[in-house]
Image: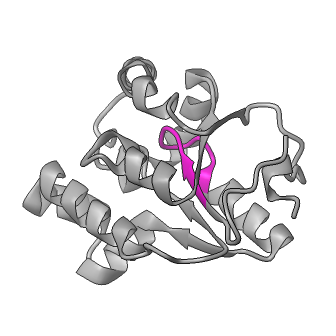
Amino acid sequence: MHIRTSAYQLIFLIGFMGSGKTYWGKLWAEKSGLDFFDLDEIVEKEQEKTIAKIFAEDGEQHFRNLETNALKKFSGKANAIFACGGGTPCFNDNLSWMNENGTSVYLQSSPENILKRLVSEKEKRPLIKHLQQDELLFYITEKIKERETYYNQAKIILNVDDLPINYLPGFLKL
């Protein structure tokens, strides 16, 4: 698989929380010489508070607007990989914007594998922090079903469950 979007390359990694967007994004950026940006980290830095605190104090819709504004500030940015939040492509027509400005890549993972990754990170994730393990698996499964309509509109769909640790996808081989 070899995809070139234009003279410059923008990759937007999308998928459910815990699917490895930050992990793979950092790895692939380092291996391919692209810059790496984590959209959640950008919002936290700009707002000087955590995502969890933004959700608690201002609500999800406010966070989604901040996220969209942060994303669109990178219009025209070249040679970068963006790890987007799990809900980023589902709000404010963000996925259309990503597809117009670069290559969206859906990092697909099973609910069971996502559960394994999220159990130890629940406190940092406002949408799941109060769920027990069985509730969490149900939540993950239902949310993925809800969001897959958006995720499946990505230009590339890549199942990450069994990728080798040093995998470099063809769309990054320049």
Residue 139 point in image, percent of width and height? 36, 23
Residue 152 point in image, percent of width and height? 52, 28
Q: Relative to residue 34, is residue 117 depicted above or below?
A: above
Residue 151 vs residue 47, the one in the foreground: 151
Q: Relative to residue 9, is residue 73 depicted above or below?
A: below
Residue 151 vs residue 43, the one in the foreground: 151
Viewport quadrant of the N terminus:
top right
Q: How many marks?
A: 0
Horizontal side of 91 relative to 134 (left or right) equals left
Q: Is residue 10 magenta?
A: no
Horizontal side of 101 relative to 78 (left or right) equals left
Residue 26 vs residue 75, the one in the foreground: 75
Tell me which corner region of the image, top left, top right, bottom left or bottom right, holds residue 63. Answer: bottom left
Tell me which corner region of the image, top left, top right, bottom left or bottom right, holds residue 75. Answer: bottom left
Residue 105 point in image, percent of width and height? 62, 44
- Residue name at image x 45 percent, y 19 percent: 141
- Residue name at image x 67 percent, y 74 percent: 79
Viewport quadrant of the C terminus:
bottom right
**Residue lying farthest front?**
6
Tell me which corner region of the image, top left, top right, bottom left or bottom right, holds residue 56. Answer: bottom left
Residue 153 point in image, percent of width and height? 50, 32
Q: Relative to residue 15, is residue 146 depicted above or below?
A: above
Span colored in magenta:
11-21
Q: What colour scheme does the image use?
A: one colour
| Residue 84 appearing in the image | no
Q: Relative to residue 165, is residue 43 depicted above or below?
A: below
Residue 69 vs residue 142, the one in the foreground: 69
| Residue 77 appearing in the image | yes
